[in-house]
Image (tube, rainbow, N blue to C red):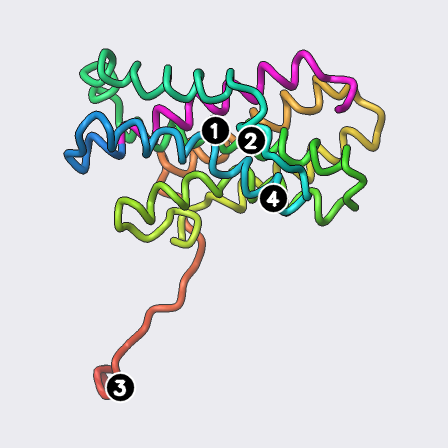
Amino acid sequence: MTTLEPFFRVLDLLGVFVFAISGSIAAARKNMDVYGSVILAVVTALGGGMIRDSLLGRTPAGAFVDPLYLLVALAGAVSVFFLYNLLGKLHYPMRYMDAIGLGVFTVTGMIIALDQDVFWFGAVMLGVISGTGGGMIRDVLCQQVPLVLEREIYAVAGILGALLTLVMLRLGLGASLSAAIGALVISSIRILSVQRDWHLPRAVWQKPGSRKI
């Protein structure tokens, strides 16, 4: 592990907690029972990291080695039952939780990859996979098109923040500070894109013969 071990662990567990909340909120919106809520929270919170660890050959995955990760994910799921009315007063509460998790997991995932001697491009991609993998599993289980595949600014925010973190690390900025700034930038871009309805361009499909003259 890198020199930011204590800070890294706190940051990683924060990502687990907020992603678990987003998964549990998604379950509530789909009228799932408590079992469905817990399952969706856990796979959202731990899925991205498990995919990353599998690609890196880190077996068993970290979530299977350290029980604290599962406990934090369960705590995030349970907290929604007590805070759902409060969260419901926010606009897009699931997406805000998602934004924080995206920022944290992208940065920590990239640093884990760098620690495994993955070159910079691969590390950035693995960071983005860490940040988006759990959300993709959640959306598929909810029978929705994953946010990362829609035109919203999601993975792009992760890529930009990961590259910024990489530059700061190469410039010799402290690992903890680089990770914190990178996570904050990613989360901020994502939250602003939700608030201001920023989207990436897309091609609009028209059926043959439907074009007006």
Q: Secondary structure at mark 1?
A: helix
Q: Nearer the viewer, mark 3 or mark 2?
A: 2
Which one is in front, 88 or 1?
1
Question: Which residue position is annotated with label 3?
Answer: 208
Query: Could you tell me which secondary element the residue under label 2 belongs to?
Result: helix
Task: Measuring from the top left, give residue 11's x and y in whole percent.
Answer: 58, 19
The residue under label 3 is which amino acid type?
Pro
- Disc nearest the viewer among 4 and 2: 4
Mark 1 or mark 3, whichever is nearer to me: 1
4 or 3: mark nearer the eye: 4
Considering the numbered disc 3 on the image, is that residue within a helix, a strand or a loop?
loop
Residue farthest along the left direction in this orientation: 31
Residue labelled with disc 4: 54
- Contact? badges 3 and 2 (CB < 8 Å): no
Measure how far apart labels 4 and 2 are at the Cα level.
16 Å
Q: Which residue is mark 1?
A: 101
Establish if 3 lies above or below 166.
Answer: above
- Upstream in sequence: badge 3 or badge 2: 2
Q: Earlier in the sequence, mark 1 or mark 3?
A: 1
Nearest the camera: 10 or 107? 10
Residue 147 image offset from top left, x and y in percent: 38, 47
Is 8 in the magenta? yes
Q: Are marks 4 and 2 in contact (CB under 8 Å)?
A: no
Of the image marks 4 and 2, the number of the one nearer the N terminus? 4
Q: Which mark is residue 202?
A: none
Tell whether 196 sits left or right of 104. Answer: left
Q: Which residues are magenta?
A: 1-25
Q: Secondary structure at mark 4?
A: helix
State the separation of the CA atoms marked 1 and 3. Answer: 42 Å
